[in-house]
Amino acid sequence: MTVLPGAEWRDRPGLRRIVAALRSDGGAVKIVGGAVRDTLLGLPVTDIDLATPLLPQDVTRRLEAADIKVIPTGIAHGTVTAIASGDHHEITTLRRDVETDGRRATVAFADDWRDDAARRDFTINALYADPDSGAIDDWFGGLADLNAGRVAFIGDAATRIAEDHLRILRFYRFAARFGRGELDAVSHAAVVTARQSLKSLSRERIADELLKILSLPDPRAIVGQMSADGIFAVLLPELDPGFAVAFDRLLANEDTAAVPVSPLRRLASLLPADAAIAEQVASRLRLSTRQRKHLAALGGSRGDVARPIRQLAYAIGVDAARDVHLLVGDPAALAALADWQVPEMPLKGGDIVARGIAVGPEVARILKAVEAEWVAEDFPGAVRVAELVDQKIGRTSD
């Protein structure tokens, strides 16, 4: 029997309190999914999810009796969040699928651990561990697949995909994170065959999963595979045919500049340098207004990379200017933006009127001309701005 190695998180006071409350009066609970998988791989564990045959109302009753706060985060699907000693843990009642349509599932509560495991996506995600002994339950060969670096669907791959079409994208993401060598042939063939079903998913779910893939440390190989498999032809037809070169350059620049990963920046590298196309993609994926504006700026400003980076930042914002230079410029230029904020021009129309210029188009013309020189001179202070105003007024008086 394989036993979960000792890990710091297994002794957290909050987790121990929750486990004790659920096990009172003969209740059962196990750790499930990512915490088990990642501990076996020696990776950091962030979320520790629990499964139990107890019904949600019984889970709530037991936890509240132990003075543990309970939030019904997904009560319709049997999930509550317990907060103990500052830690948050999701607890889900064992389930079995009653009906699925590729987008959502109707579930019934169950009391069989294997039934619950069978409705999960990949074998490596269907590992359950006893919180105390660490003994691992593995009904579908997840341990062997984990050791082999193989990401494979549980049971019939086509059936798993038909239950939730998002599993197509999850297959690529998990393969990139945990896979080694060739993709599992059966699972790979199934996602390629089912790729058109991605059209049935909500745009928000597609965007979320795509950005997660682009957030991986180095997603180049899997993005290339997705392109070869026709995945982007379905969900990102705007993909630039030469994206691989741009993607390579971006990741090299990110590494040189030691900047945090930005999935939106990486998405921009897959698209043509065209603001309208970026807007189209952002709209279809239903990105936020902020994300849409940022993506459009990256699409429309790459031709301005020859401008001094602070001038570009004044025009499109610091974050966008930084990303443009990572996409197509020199990462060394980013040093000019360190601890720098876009300044506000220290001149208003009223200041010009106070110099004796009548309100009207001439004020706007002077203001615009001064601003252009102020930007070109790298944003000097008020004294130099006053000199520039004097020059412009002097010229108009000739």
Image (tube, helix red, strand yellow):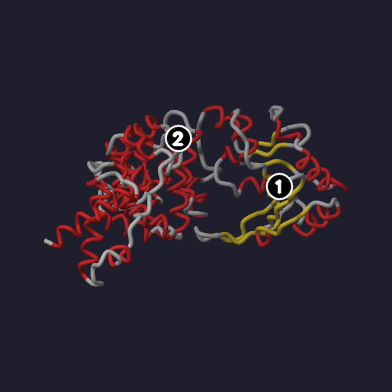
Front-most of residues 338 and 347: 347
Label 2 SS: loop
For image coordinates 38% across by 34% down, the residue present is 254
Coordinates of residue 135 in the picture (x, y in percent): 73, 32
Mark 1 closeness class: few <14, some 14–19, many ≥20 residues within 10 Å: many
**Can residue 230 be seen here?**
no
Label 1 SS: strand
Quadrant occupied by the C terminus: bottom left
For image coordinates 36% across by 50% down, the residue present is 317
For image coordinates 86% across by 47% down, the residue present is 24
Cα distance, mark 2 to mark 1? 30 Å
Q: From the viewer's perspective, tell me whether residue 251 is left or right of residue 120.
A: left
What type is the residue that disc 2 sits on? Answer: Pro
Front-most of residues 27 and 280: 280
Residue 337 in which image quadrant: top left
* Mark toward the viewer: 2 or 1: 2
What type is the residue that disc 1 sits on? Answer: Ala
Coordinates of residue 121 in the picture (x, y in percent): 55, 46
Residue 148, relative to residue 388: is it above or below? above
Q: Are marks 2 and 1 in contact (CB under 8 Å)?
A: no
Front-most of residues 23 and 48: 48
Judging by the rendered image, the residue that carries numbered circle 2 is 217
Judging by the rendered image, the residue that carries numbered circle 1 is 51
Q: From the viewer's perspective, tell me whether residue 231 is left or right of residue 288.
A: left
Coordinates of residue 120 in the picture (x, y in percent): 59, 47
Coordinates of residue 116 in the picture (x, y in percent): 66, 48
**Residue lying furthest right in this view?**
25
Mark 2 closeness class: few <14, some 14–19, many ≥20 residues within 10 Å: few
